[in-house]
């Protein structure tokens, strides 16, 4: 039941990203003749830092062992021009085992990649699509069983991620950022995957 509620919440959040993006989109006022137009050269590059938090939804094989959990992280990016940017992400993903009393498990993500923007000068919201590649570090705490002790586990594997997002302008230097991502991790046993939905504040400078 809890898992179904989280999945429903995820779908609601994705819908909210799209609906809120459009509802916040406002037509900019026409500048007066005495206001000097800002050139593209003076606008870019734009650097960003974004603390974010949200929910992780394990899928497929990972979903058989873990329930939805918390995720948080920090994005750092640079927008090179109107359409293209680069970003790097460090994220923490807490995994809740389906078995009560099981040891705590988590992933740490370190990834980077391109970000493509879909924007208009008449809109205060900006949609984007990003894709990244990097390392995913899995760890599981040590625990006791009836037959003995199980040591702490830790391993690092390569992974990729992709997903859409939107930024909603609050001021010239601060945006609200909302996004969802699909993560695919490669390991010796095959692949592991999960979805994330998260939001936060984007600071521009």
Image: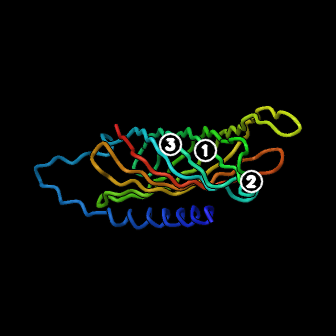
The colour mode here is rainbow
What numbered label is drawn on residue 93?
Answer: 1
x%, y% of residue 155? 75, 36
Crowd class of label 3 (few under 14; some 14 to 19; many from 20; radius 10 Å): some
Q: Residue at x 27, y 45 (%)?
A: 172
Q: CA distance from mark 2 to mark 3?
A: 34 Å
x%, y% of residue 63? 71, 57
Residue 109 lies in what quarter of the image?
Answer: top right
**Relative horizontal placement of residue 111, taking residue 15 as reference (left or right):** right
For marks 2 and 3, the one nearer the N-term is: 2
Q: Nearer the viewer, residue 98 or 8?
A: 98
In front: label 1 or label 2:
2
Q: Residue at x 42, y 43 (%)?
A: 79
Mark 3 sits on what residue? Answer: 86
x%, y% of residue 59? 69, 58
Which residue sits furthest left? 34
Q: Nearer the viewer, residue 103 or 195?
A: 103
x%, y% of residue 74? 49, 39
Where does the C terminus fall, quadrant-wise? top left
Where does the N terminus fall, quadrant-wise? bottom right
Q: CA distance from mark 3 to mark 1?
A: 22 Å
Mark 2 sits on what residue? Answer: 65
Residue 202 lies in what quarter of the image?
Answer: top left
Mark 1: secondary structure: strand
Tell me, yes or no, whether the two marked residues, 3 and 1, touch with CB atoms within 8 Å: no
**Relative horizontal placement of residue 151, taking residue 199 as reference (left or right):** right
In front: label 2 or label 3:
2
């Amino acid at each position: 039941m809890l898992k179904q509620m989280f999945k429903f919440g995820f779908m609601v959040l994705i819908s909210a990203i799209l609906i809120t993006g459009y509802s916040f989109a406002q037509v900019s006022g026409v500048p007066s003749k005495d206001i000097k137009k800002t050139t593209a050269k003076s606008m870019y590059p734009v650097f960003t830092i974004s603390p974010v938090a949200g929910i992780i939804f394990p899928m497929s094989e990972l979903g058989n062992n873990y329930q939805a959990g918390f995720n948080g992280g920090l994005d750092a990016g640079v927008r090179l021009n109107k359409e293209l940017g680069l970003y790097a992400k460090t994220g923490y993903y807490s995994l809740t085992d389906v078995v009560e009393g099981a040891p705590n498990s988590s992933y740490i993500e370190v990834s980077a990649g391109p970000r493509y923007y879909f924007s208009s000068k008449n809109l205060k919201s900006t949609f984007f699509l990003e894709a990244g590649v990097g390392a995913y570090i899995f760890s599981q705490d040590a625990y006791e069983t009836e037959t003995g002790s199980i040591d702490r586990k830790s391993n690092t594997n390569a992974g990729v991620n992709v997903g859409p997002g939107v930024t909603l302008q609050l001021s010239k230097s601060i945006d609200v950022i909302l996004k969802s991502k699909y993560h695919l991790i490669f390991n010796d046993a095959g692949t592991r995957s999960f979805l994330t939905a998260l939001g936060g504040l984007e600071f521009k400078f």
